[in-house]
């Protein structure tokens, strides 16, 4: 029984669960530009205020081969970065196809404890300061990141934060849901229905990643969504599925499943407490199956309807509840009992709409352990009040032809007047 480990460290809360096994090796990285502020003043204010947020006082510790959540008072980790041309956002975006963000996790306490949060500050030209926030994915999904970054923005502005007491979910996360039955504790049935296929080109490892950000005016997209009911997520599914068929020379009738992260806090089974929770990683997938239509607009309508149907499946809840037990809570052994849809072997594409992240022009990356299984190729989107940002994540050496096809579909869809011309 894992409680014996508490004799080695009384700070232990619980072991990581099977879902966290897949997120602990990923970091979410976001930067934005602010009116000039002092790094020293930020250190002082951030240490004082972020320590009031419960999840900032957590860490993950390795004991032998096993990982555990521990209580650990927040300690600010900050690096001051010397200015160079690529620290300026415009220059960075122009050259990001050459910029590999290394997988560079930080550790402390004899390299046994993960640093869950750290910051970088660079004083830019024109009286501006760039702040980068890096957070471990196990404690934060991209939707939680928006809330965290809003707190950091308030700290920069000199505001005092109130306490946020949201405890770490239990190992099985059952307290997050109500009125569940046994069927919701089993993996999504759709996983067995997904056809075998090889959608992605073969690239030898090890893998390093680049992220290409494409920026669109949000206002015309918002107008199009209001007029048609077609969401950004449906648009992303259409973009990625159309590109996959075109790259692989597949007939339009070929079914593809979209791995679509979904905020399980919005589930009909979520408790009121969970619905209002702003922190931690609370997403899992739904899996709409789409086939190509005669026109682009028909594709978009089709993806909209299939996405609605898949959300009703509650597969996101199934994935969370069944996924926790992939690590046996008694033995702490990783014991996979089902296969997650892998784009290297199954007919799936990946996309995710993260929603709104306020800021000047926040630039977001996911930073992966490049040698963990096969490589990743997917897109995520998010928006400010003025811009929609679509990020394509891919390994160095990925086929440029595939990238060009995705970009073509992206421009056809996210510049709404192009949709009319394609029908």
Image (cartoon, rainbow, N blue to C red):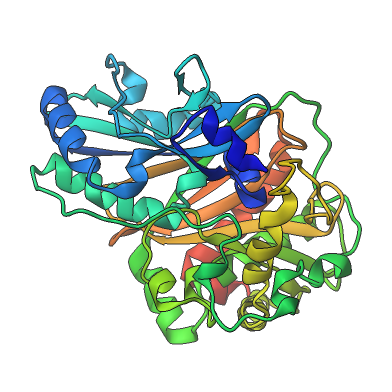
In the picture, residue 279 is in which quadrant?
A: bottom left
Please state which of residues 47 and 7 is positioned toward the viewer in this rendering.
7
Determine the residue positioned at 10% across, 44% down: 157
Determine the residue positioned at 68% across, 43% down: 1
Determine the residue positioned at 18% across, 38% down: 34
Determine the residue positioned at 50% across, 76% down: 270
Q: Quadrant of the C terminus?
A: bottom right
Residue 80 position in % (x across, y down): 26, 18
Left or right, 278 with respect to 254, comes to left
Residue 324 position in % (x across, y down): 66, 56
Left or right, 114 with respect to 398, comes to left
Left or right, 100 with respect to 310, comes to left
Please state which of residues 83 and 78 is positioned toward the viewer in this rendering.
78
In the picture, residue 224 is in which quadrant?
A: bottom left
Please state which of residues 98 and 150 is positioned toward the viewer in this rendering.
150
Figure label count:
0
Please state which of residues 144 and 406 is positioned toward the viewer in this rendering.
144
- Give above or below for 380 relative to 51: below
Outermost residue to the right? 196
Is residue 98 visible to the viewer in this orientation of the structure? yes
In the picture, residue 313 is in which quadrant?
A: bottom right
Residue 23 position in % (x across, y down): 59, 44
- Give above or below for 55 relative to 12: below
Left or right, 210 with respect to 306, comes to left
Is residue 25 visible to the viewer in this orientation of the structure? no
């Amino acid at each position: 029984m894992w409680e014996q480990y508490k004799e080695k460290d009384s700070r232990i809360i619980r072991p990581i669960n099977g879902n966290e096994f897949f997120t602990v090796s990923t970091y979410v990285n976001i930067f934005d530009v602010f009116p000039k502020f002092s790094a020293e003043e930020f250190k002082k204010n951030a240490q004082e205020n972020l320590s009031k947020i419960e999840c900032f006082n957590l860490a993950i510790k390795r004991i032998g081969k096993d990982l555990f959540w521990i209580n650990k008072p927040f300690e600010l980790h900050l690096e001051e970065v010397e200015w160079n041309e690529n620290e300026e956002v415009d220059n960075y975006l122009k050259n990001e196809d050459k910029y590999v963000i290394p997988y560079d996790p930080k550790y402390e306490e004899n390299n046994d404890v993960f640093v869950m949060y750290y910051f970088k500050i660079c004083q830019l030209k024109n009286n501006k300061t760039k702040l980068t926030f890096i957070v471990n994915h196990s404690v934060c999904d991209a939707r939680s990141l928006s809330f965290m970054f809003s707190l950091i923005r308030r700290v920069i502005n000199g505001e005092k934060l109130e306490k946020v007491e949201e405890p770490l979910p239990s190992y099985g996360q059952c307290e997050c849901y109500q009125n569940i039955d046994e069927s919701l504790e089993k993996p999504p049935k759709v996983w067995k229905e997904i056809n075998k296929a090889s959608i992605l080109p073969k690239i030898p490892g090890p893998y390093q990643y680049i992220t290409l950000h494409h920026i669109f005016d949000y206002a015309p997209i918002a107008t199009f969504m209001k007029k048609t009911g077609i969401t950004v997520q449906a648009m992303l599914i259409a973009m990625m599925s159309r590109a996959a068929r075109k790259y692989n020379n597949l007939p339009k009738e070929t079914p593809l499943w979209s791995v679509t992260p979904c905020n399980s806090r919005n589930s009909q089974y979520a408790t009121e407490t969970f619905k209002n929770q702003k922190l931690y990683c609370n997403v899992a997938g739904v899996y709409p199956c789409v086939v190509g239509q005669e026109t682009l607009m028909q594709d978009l309508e089709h993806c909209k309807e299939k996405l609605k149907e898949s959300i009703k499946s509650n597969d996101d809840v199934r994935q969370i509840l069944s996924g926790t037990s992939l690590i046996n809570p008694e033995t702490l052994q990783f014991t996979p009992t089902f296969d997650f849809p892998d784009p290297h072997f199954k007919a799936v594409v990946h996309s995710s709409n993260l929603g709104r992240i306020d800021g000047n022009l926040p630039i977001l990356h996911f930073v992966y352990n490049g040698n963990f299984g096969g490589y990743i190729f997917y897109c995520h989107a998010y928006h400010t009040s003025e811009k929609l940002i679509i990020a394509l994540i891919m390994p160095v050496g990925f086929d440029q032809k595939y990238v060009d096809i995705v970009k073509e579909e992206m421009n056809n869809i996210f510049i709404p007047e192009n949709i009319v011309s394609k029908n």
